[in-house]
Amino acid sequence: MNIVLLGAPGAGKGTQAAKLVEEYELPHISTGDMLRAAVKEGTPLGKKAKSFMDAGDLVPDDVIIGLVTERLQGKDTEKGFILDGFPRTSAQAVALDAELSKLGRPLDAALLIDVDPEVIVNRLTSRRMCKECGYIGTIADETCPKCGGEMYQRDDDNEATVRNRLDVYEKSTAPLIDYYRGCDLLVAIDGDRDPAVVYADVKKSLGL
Ligand code: AMP
């Protein structure tokens, strides 16, 4: 199962990816998580990416395409993968197609988690994440309900940056919906529901 997750920031891609990964034991390739890890470790990639991320802008295509292309070479992706947060531009989608056709592993679906932008502003500004396990929760979670770890707010989850991320999404990433519709790969799900209900719909729509 080779899947790309589409949807605005905060639509629930990470939450749905975590569920798919747990149930089907597929590698979760989240470019946002990879970049945040690089920033935390202070690598050259992290240093380059940080200012873009803090502003809610996209990291340059060449940087991110190189990162994902290398990750797809990993042996673990042979049984399938969930790509979360990539592609985000047409250039990334074209590069992904080229790489997957080279590997002989075409996409099975582009899954769109669809949520209204105003719902997203509220969701993201009250989102909190676990420092230890990456669990995605809300401001109501004082500690992580999964592992007891400390919860924190992402640097880019403040309202001004969230609004910029939504603008960037509309301009650069939303056109990919038509791109994947044209490839007959688009599966659209209403993401403005309880995560468990969304997940049941995800599985049904993917024929799982
Ligand atoms: P995310 O966790 O997916 O919301 O990503 C957080 C931030 O990382 C984004 O706002 C971008 O600055 C950067 N980022 C993640 N994935 C990509 C991508 N595919 N292309 C460019 N920038 C990205």
Image: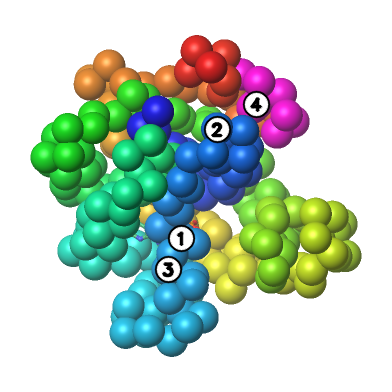
Would you say 188 lies left or right of 123 here? left
Amino acid type of the residue tagged 1 in the rendering: Gly
Q: Which residue is mark 2?
A: 24
Amino acid type of the residue tagged 4 in the rendering: Val
Amino acid type of the residue tagged 3 in the rendering: Leu
**Residues tagged 1 and 2 counted as in contact (Cβ below 8 A):** no
Amino acid type of the residue tagged 2 in the rendering: Tyr
Q: Is mark 3 within 8 Å of ligand 1?
A: yes
Residue at the far front in the pictured view: 75
Q: Is mark 2 within 8 Å of ligand 1?
A: no
Q: Position of residue 19 (x, y in %)?
A: 63, 37
- For the residues marked 4 and 3, what is the alpha-carbon distance in whole angstroms? 27 Å
Please tell me whether mark 4 sits on a helix, a strand or a loop.
helix
Residue 198 image label: 4
Mark 1: few/some/many CA within 10 Å (<14, 14-19, 20+)? some
Among numbered discs 1 and 4, the one appearing first in the sequence:
1
Magenta range is: 194-201
